[in-house]
Amino acid sequence: MGKVYATVDGRLRSFVERQHVFFVGTSPLAAEGHVNVSPRGIPGTFGLVDERTFAWVDTSGSGSETIAHLRENGRIVVMFCAFDGAPNIVRFHGRGRVVSRYDEEYADLAARFEDVPGARAVIVVDIERISDACGYGVPLMDYVGERDLLPRYFGRKGVEGSADYRRRKNRTSIDGLPAFDFDPLDEWTTLAGLGRIRERLAGQIDGWRAPYSWTVALDGEPGHVNLPGGQHALAAVVLATVLKYDGATATLELSRQQLDEAITALAPASACTEVEHPNLASWRALRTAHDERGGAITAVFVRDATDPESSATDAALRARW
């Protein structure tokens, strides 16, 4: 039968320190919000700070639900399962907090763990309840090895490229709560800075070449038309990054989620007052129109004026030239 413990020490601590993976559960306060469960387990990036404190290095990724929920309400549960040996489940219920890579406390906390490319924070859990359970329903499984894909992915991006990724993917939760929005926006305030960001993003797309003209449309009606010779190349590469597309002539479906992602990624550019931001305004207006009446959202790229039209929407775009 399960027991509740006052501290994590002795046999309990040895069990936790042997594990290759653990699971984190958090939730927003709103009843209609999405509960989140995340697996964690990069070697050397997690462990007990003391007998009632657990922490791990939180790496950049495609979402930021844990951070968003902790910022809103702090509630968290961490669970370890025995997949080999004697059956056991250990849970830490408590209050979590986010120490971002920009906080003074981060260096001392991160020094306890392995350095991982793309690290964005250390999550610290003040444990309020320590318990175990039988674990009889957990299957026996063999540990084969680690995947090195995540460290290699963010290693290629570098520090600034990882921050660009977080600005696109991690600023809000799926429910719209503030998540990892700590990355500085200084570079976004000048044209020169926007140019550097554009070049970094472009360098991550194989075969990228800035399109001759492009737009985002709702039900075939183009929004803001980026005319040949226009200056808003950052918006084009942001959109292409979201779509994972090289900018060749085509008409592509754009989901509402992808539109939201593009808006979130481009929004910091409004800090630069040297230019207007018509694409951002157009995308937001299109999103509002889509909320009101639905419809099909498409992105149209024209790489070369001599390329054949890819759709009726492409023809409507070219008619604006």
Image (cartoon, helix red, strand yellow):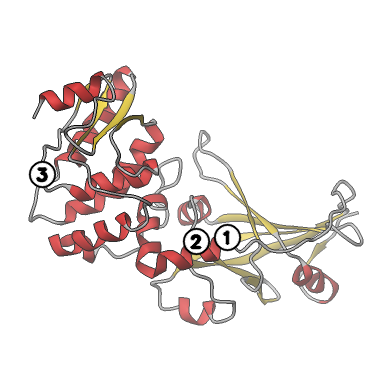
Placement of 44 over or under 181, stated as above or below: below
The tag on residue 230 is 3
Which residue is at 28% across, 25% downward?
310
Q: Nearer the viewer, residue 284 or 7?
A: 284
Q: Residues within 10 Å of mark 3 (few under 14, many from 20)?
A: few
Placement of 87 over or under 266, stated as above or below: below
From the viewer's perspective, tell me whether residue 220 is left or right of residue 27. Answer: left
User: Are the two marked residues, 1 and 2, in contact with CB atoms closer than 8 angstroms?
Assistant: yes
Placement of 45 over or under 274, stated as above or below: below
Q: Earlier in the sequence, mark 1 or mark 3?
A: 1
Mark 2: which amino acid? Answer: Tyr
Quadrant of the rendered image containing residue 49: bottom right
Residue where numbered disc 1 is placed: 149
Which quarter of the figure is the C terminus placed in?
top left
Residue where numbered disc 2 is placed: 153
User: Where residue 308 appears, x then y in whole percent?
Assistant: 24, 26
Q: Is residue 192 visible?
A: yes
